[in-house]
Structure formats: structure tokens, C-alpha cells
Amino acid sequence: MKKAYRIAVIPGDGTGPEVVAEGIKVLKAVSKQSSLDFQFKTFDIGGERYLREGVLVADDEISQLKRIDAIFLGAIGHPGVKPGILEREILLKLRFELDLYINLRPVALFAGVDTPLKGKGPGDIDFVVVRENSEGMYAGGGGFFKKGTPDEIAIQESVNTRKGVERCNRYAFEYCRKRDGKKRLTLCGKNNVLIYESDLWYRVFQELHEDYPDITVNYQHVDALCMWMIKNPEQFDVIVTNNLFGDIITDIGAIIQGGLGIAAGGNINPEGTAMFEPIGGSAPKYAGLGQINPLAAISAAQMMLEYLGENEAAERLLGAIKSVVNEKIISLDAGKMGYSTSEVGDLVVRCLT
Ligand code: IPM
Ligand code: MN
């Protein structure tokens, strides 16, 4: 009997459906070679449906998604919808409702990939960012006062609960312990200015460190960390940080690992479900052209296998992705790969065997 996983698929908008199709193709190939079986159920969530039916995410969809083993997401974002609506009412809603409180973003430069960092190679760029994904500036606290008048005031609050900060830091320590890395955890904050938020993060981080004497820790202000990610990325193993800082620094992470063609992430509730996605967005200008790089989505599928505890399959898929990157495609950029979107998916399948 094969071990069966129920995977919700949200192809979404723009190039989402194209890259998700390649991810599924690869997962089916993985299934053929292993004792794993994936049952895919597609959810029509995204900008198209919103424009057609006015529905963002239905309550019933949320409850179905809560019961599923993992979610595979393409992209959410539509040029026909005012910015902010789909992001908040779909992507952030799923993160909040499913309490996907970890955003895990590996940053690894594979052999054969160009990085904009001069003199840096694969051995130098290999770390993981653990981003808090359920509160902070994203909680939406605050408001306007006297909006639209010359006296108007806009207040945007960052919400940091001890529970939220603790579970994120604990996950980061555990992840760092498990990871085959330098056993070094860096807290990224801004405690010289954010005297409440970063103070709580710093205290919780120090307290938890007592349970993890095998992990070396350090602290960096977010602005300095941005410089170090570019100057000396080799110092990092695991970085833990709040929602907004994590959002920003992982874009630096994506570009130094070769760009959005390869960058993937997982939105994880370690006690519940998790959602994996290429972090590049819907790239509407490439939609339907067969030119977008599916490797970020395939890497998201790879992370999903890891999350499901299918380490052997995950390792095999990682090996296949690395071979394709190193030996087959010319560039990771859309339209410059030397192959079409589906051909790149085929190459990964071939390298799996
Ligand atoms: C990301 C994205 C989202 C975020 C946007 C689309 C709301 O940038 O996943 O990093 O800010 O978290
Ligand atoms: Mn982002």
C-alpha cells in the first residue's frame, strides 16, 4: 500500500498555473518511484475568480484547507485587481486563518548559478531565514485619524505576543539544531530603536538559548544584517526575525541565490498544515508564454516533501533540481533558460531517475 498525502493545489494567477503544473508533474514522477501517493485537489482561488464571482476565499475552503496535509500554491496577484486586496484577503488570510506562523525561506546558491555577489560561490551562500508569519506589522493594527484632512494621522502598529515570539524562536532553534549547518542562530532585530518589540524578541531569544547550548547565537540589527548578507553571507546558518524584517531580507536572499526563478518558501504551522510556494509572484507579463522558470515551484514541492518527513524523496528531488541547474539550463531567468517551462519540468523528471 502506498502512503497517501492529500495535497491542496491553488494554481492562482498569472504564471501560477504553469509552474504548479510542472511541480505536480514532478511530484507524480516522485510518486512513481517511491511508496508515496499524492491526491491532488484543486482550489480555484485567485484574482480571476474574484473578478468573475467576487469571492476571495470562502469559509468552507478555509475549513477544507485546514484538514489537508499540505497546500501547493502557485501565485496570487492580478493586474486587474487593486493592489492589496488579493494579498490581504487571500494570501495573508490563509496565513492567519491556518495559523501558518512560520515562513521558512532557504537561501542556497547552487553550483552553476550566477549570483550578483562578486567572488561568492555555492559554499558561501547557504542559510535559512525563519520569518515570523502571523503577527508583527502584518497584524493590521492601527488606524487613521482625521483621514483626508491636513491633520490626518496614520498609525501602523506591530503586534508581538510572547506566545508568537516564543513559538517562532523555538522553531528556529529546533530547525538550527536539525539542520546540517554551522549550528549558528542569528536574531535579526532593531533593538536600538524598537525598544518594545525588539526587546521582547531579544529576551525570549536569550531565554530559549538556555535550552539549546549546542547552538551558537548572535544578534544583528536588521540594517547591518542587510549589509552582511551581501558582504559576508557565509557567516549565516539560520536567521530568525519578525514578519516585516523577514519579508525584506528574504528578497535580498532570493536575489543572491540566483533570483525568483529558484526561490521558494514554506508557510508552516508545525502543528497543522503548511503551504508551499515559489516566492516570485504571478509575473503577469510572462503568463501563458511557457517561458517562466518552474524551478522555484518545483523547489517549493521539494520543501513540501521535506515537511511531510519524506526525506529520501526530498533529497532525490533536490539532487535533480541541482543537476538541471548545473548541467542543463543556461539561465534561471524567464525566457533565457534555453528551454520552455514544461521542458524544464521534463528535465527534472529525467534527472530523478
Ligand atoms: C511575500 C510577499 C507578501 C508578504 C505580500 C504579497 C503580501 O511579499 O510572501 O513575501 O509581504 O508577505
Ligand atoms: Mn515579500
Image: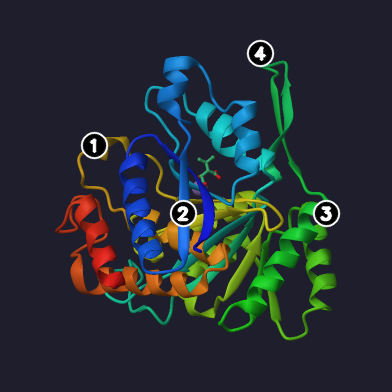
Kindly report which numbered mark, 1 or 4, lies closer to the viewer in this rendering: 1
Mark 4 → mark 3, Cα distance in angstroms: 38 Å
Instruction: Tell me, yes or no, if residue 252 can be seen here.
Output: no
Tell me: 111 left or right of 218. Answer: left
**First reached walking from the N terminus: tag 4 or tag 3:** 4
State whether label 3 is within 8 Å of ligand 1.
no
Name the residue carrying label 1. 288
Name the residue carrying label 2. 38
Q: Residue at x 26, y 69 (%)?
A: 324
Image height check: is 86 above or below 192?
above
Mark 1 → mark 3, Cα distance in angstroms: 44 Å
**First reached walking from the N terminus: tag 3 or tag 2:** 2
Name the residue carrying label 4. 149
**First reached walking from the N terminus: tag 4 or tag 2:** 2
Q: Residue at x 21, y 44 (%)?
A: 290
Q: Residues within 10 Å of mark 2 (few under 14, many from 20)?
A: some
